Image (tube, grey):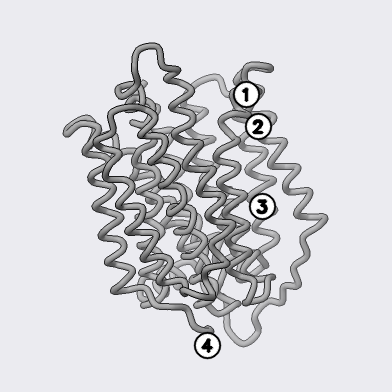
Amino acid sequence: MVFWSGALVTSTGVSLAIFSPIWGALADRYGRKVMVLRALLVGGLIIALMGLVQNVGQFLVLRILQGMFTGTIAAATALVASIVPRERLAASMGQLQTSVYVGIAAGPVMGGVIAQAVGIRGTFFIAGAMLAIGGVFVWQFVHEHFTPPSTRRPLGFFESLRLGLRSRTLMPLMVTLLLVQLSTAIVFPILPLFVERISQAGDPVKLYAGLAFGATAVFSALAALAYSRLVDRTGYRRILIFACFGAALLFLPQAFVQNAGQFLLLRGGLGIFFGVLIPATNAIVGLSTPPELRGSAYGLTSGATAVGNAVGPLLGSTLAATLGFPSVFIATSAVLALLGIWVIGRVREPVSPP
């Protein structure tokens, strides 16, 4: 059971990490809107098919296919970056990330309600339909005036990967997003168990565990919506540095909390800093990359994010099993502090791309 659970979680992240750069390169060649439609419509079909599986092997295959053909957030990020004016990019990235965090907060609640009403299989059918409806909305209401680049040949997959790894601008941002996502996902497997350990007799443990996830997501959504107002005064790089060290400071005391109330307070405060990290980094990517290469750039950063999402839970479970629950929070605090130092040394304030 433990093996299959880990395989189902990790497989999607691994396949997403491999295929995101491929879809990114294709976005530069054929347009970003068509990539969003691909992610939503094909993803909707794959998730709906999960409601029909008869064994865990079939489910694993569909989870791998989900990683191969979806990547909705990366596709949407590239599309937004290509159609909004430069001066609105920070606000647009914040709004996009806010919608992601709202989905993270509301999704488990809706899933529980739907499963209670129509069964677990029914949740897959409804989730697939929701993605398909999203695809229809994008098809009807999102307009992209895409012109295939004539002066520069679109990059292939390996060219795109080589460019990203050699780029003094993009590679540090890929590392930043990988470590941000790792720091987010590292607590996923241990959070409910940790909440149970620190709760008092008679406490609603399941409710507290849900609130521990939800509090971070809600405050992240609010922070992502508000951060763009600070960018003009402070700059993207300074915001990133502040958010890294702020998140590190709030992760560390989580290792020493004595009750669920203290833990929930720290998780909510953590969301304020986490909500800034991804939209600010994505905005730097868009501002530092030529328009005709933004699909490739966001494909690479999405791949890095997927690696963090796949490695984080495995690292968190290993640390908790060998060194105990507090070690997860202490290690994550150290990672975020080192990330702040990395941003100071390697990430540059964005300038207009050539």
Taking 166 as reference, is 42 above or below it?
above
Q: Nearer the viewer, residue 185 or 47?
A: 185
Tell me where residue 316 sits by quadrant.
top left
Q: Tally the numbered discs.
A: 4
Q: Position of residue 226 (x, y in %)?
A: 57, 59
Residue at disc 4, secondary structure: loop
Q: Earlier in the sequence, mark 1 or mark 4?
A: 1
Q: The N terminus appears in which quarter of the rendering?
A: top left
What residue sits 39% from the left and 72% below the top?
162
Q: Amino acid at mark 4?
A: Pro
**Vertical comparison of 180 with 284: above or below:** above
In the structure shown, which secondary structural element does the residue marked by tag 2 occupy?
helix
Spatial CA span between label 4 and label 2: 44 Å
Looking at the picture, how far across and down is residue 176, in whole percent? Answer: 37, 62
Q: Report the amino acid beneath label 2.
A: Ala
Residue at the disc numbered 2: 48
Q: Which residue is mark 4?
A: 354
Mark 3 vs 2, N-terminal side: 3
Contact (CB < 8 A) between labels 3 and 2? no
Q: Nearer the viewer, residue 338 or 13?
A: 338
Q: Is residue 270 left or right of residue 86?
A: left
Residue highlighted by disc 1: 52
Instruction: Give the answer, above or below, for where 87 lies relative to 250.
Output: below
Which residue has dot 3 on it? 38
The amino acid type, in three-letter code, at marker 1 is Leu
CB within 8 Å, label 1 to label 2: yes
